[in-house]
Amino acid sequence: MNCLFCEIPNVRVIAKNELAYAIRDGFPVTSLHTLIIPKRHAVTYFDLSDAEILACNQLMQEIKTTILKEDSSVDGFNIGMNAGEAAGQTVFHCHIHLIPRRKGDVENPRGGVRHIIPGKGFYKATE
């Protein structure tokens, strides 16, 4: 099996724990865009064990703290996963995107991940 994330060189790893590791994204959306990846080959987040989910979450918290210390311009984060080809997954080994966001990086960030589907990001809430 040729899996990009099963064969990542150690030199790319910026943090790790027993069950997961982190690398900077090779095609970053923003500066310091990071991927959190379980060590065991699992295709999607839904294939992870509870222990792997916890390990990924712990590593994500660690990386978030590191990014905030490294870059004071970071004001928020998007966290995303693509599960399945229809959802845009192209590397079929689970990976979680931690994308730092900064004020002004897009004209209007309202709606965040809802912009995955064109026209769905902006909506008017009803009471």
Image: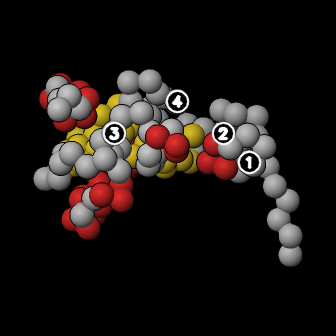
Of labels 4 and 3, the one closer to you: 3
- The residue that label 1 is drawn on is 121
Residue depicted at 33% across the width and 39% down the height: 92
* Quarter placement of the N terminus: top left
Assess whether mark 3 and mark 1 are in contact (beta carbons under 8 angstroms).
no
Residue depicted at 38% across the width and 24% down the height: 26
- The residue that label 4 is drawn on is 29
Residue lying furthest bottom? 127
* Quarter placement of the C terminus: bottom right
**Vertical order, 46 against 24 (above or below):** below
- In the image, residue 55 lies at what x, y percent? 24, 58
Identify the disc placed on residue 103.
2
Looking at the rendered structure, the kind of residue marked 4 is Val
Looking at the rendered structure, the kind of residue marked 3 is Phe
Of labels 1 and 3, the one closer to you: 3
Report, in whole angstroms, how far the alpha carbon at label 4 lies from the one at label 3: 19 Å
**Vertical order, 44 against 35 (above or below):** below
Badge 3 crowding class, 10 Å Cα cut-off, few under 14, some 14 to 19, many 20 or more, is some
- In the image, residue 113 lies at what x, y percent? 62, 48
Q: Secondary structure at mark 3?
A: loop
Using the image as rendered, state which of residue 121 and residue 76 is in the foreground.
Answer: 121
Q: Secondary structure at mark 4?
A: loop
